[in-house]
Image (cartoon, rainbow, N blue to C red):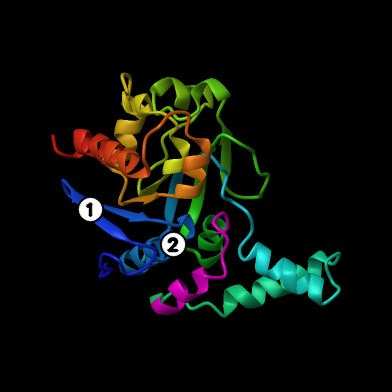
Amino acid sequence: MDFENGAFSNLRIETIGNKEIYITDRHQYVLPIWTAYSNENAASYVLVSIDYHPDTNPPFWQVLTLKATLDNREDDPAYFNRLLEKKIHSLDRYDIGKVIAAVEELNNDEHINTAMALGVLSDYHMLNCMDVHKYESGRHYLIDKKYFGLLEDGMFQSVNFELPPRPFILDIDLDYFMRTSDFDIKKDAYFAKLVEDAEIITVARSKKYFEYLKKEAFSIDACESLLLDCFRRYLEK
């Protein structure tokens, strides 16, 4: 992919071992990265996302709900679906410039199902601390409070998570982490395998939510650095 640092949403690209890691300020801006990678390899990917929030609202939910309301059709699901179908069909996934522009209309919890609608993703596994959304596709795992922020095997086992077949993309939101000790991973078979086997890794800083949810005084930069150190542990063997 030909993205450059700072191309959008304060994009930062790290190469650790042979793995590319893409870090954005706003979570929805991982969509152009996933799309470009899917286009480049003519493949649809499974996503594994670890986040405090589920981030799987329908594509363009907020802007289309507003339009339906302004059109006095807010109680007409068929009308919303027609708006959505038209919106998705108008979005050329092979024109990455237009995909980037379209992201401005996405809320920070609408990118996953947008990627599903575009065929960039074929499935997803959403590990989160808030909710289990019920859709025809995708799978949600609701993490118990005692495991919030953790990447230990016990967290993955507690929700009966199974490693997906390759190829998959690993995606992590920094607002999932609440303490520096969250990165002291003792039993790491699941997370190590996710990092090692992911085709690419995307990371969202989500600073506003990170600052609100953290349980001790540490910065978003420190959190990002600790996560990258974890990646180095597995990718620079």
Residue 36 placement (x, y as % from top left): 36, 67
Identify which amino acid the numbered label 2 is placed on: Tyr
Determine whether 108 is above or below 234 in the image: below
Q: From this viewpoint, which residue is outermost toward the front?
A: 217
Q: From this viewpoint, which residue is outermost toward the left?
A: 237
Q: Does 121 appear in magenta?
A: no
Residue at numbered disc 1: 14
Along the line of sight, which residue is nearer the eye, 214 or 89?
Answer: 214
Looking at the rendered image, the quarter that the N terminus falls into is: bottom left
Residue 218 placement (x, y as % from top left): 37, 35
Residue 88 placement (x, y as % from top left): 59, 73
Residue at numbered disc 2: 29
Along the line of sight, which residue is nearer the eye, 72 or 31?
Answer: 72
Asked which secondary structure carries label 2, the reply is: helix
Determine whether 188 is above or below 219 in the image: above
Q: CA distance from mark 1 to mark 2?
A: 16 Å
Question: For mark 1, does the 10 Å Cα neighbourhood hold few (<14), some (14 to 19), or many (20 or more) residues?
Answer: some
Residue 48 placement (x, y as % from top left): 44, 44
Give the magenta part as a residue range: 97-110
Residue 154 horizontal side relative to residue 41, left or right:
right
Is residue 86 visible in the rendered structure shown here?
Answer: yes
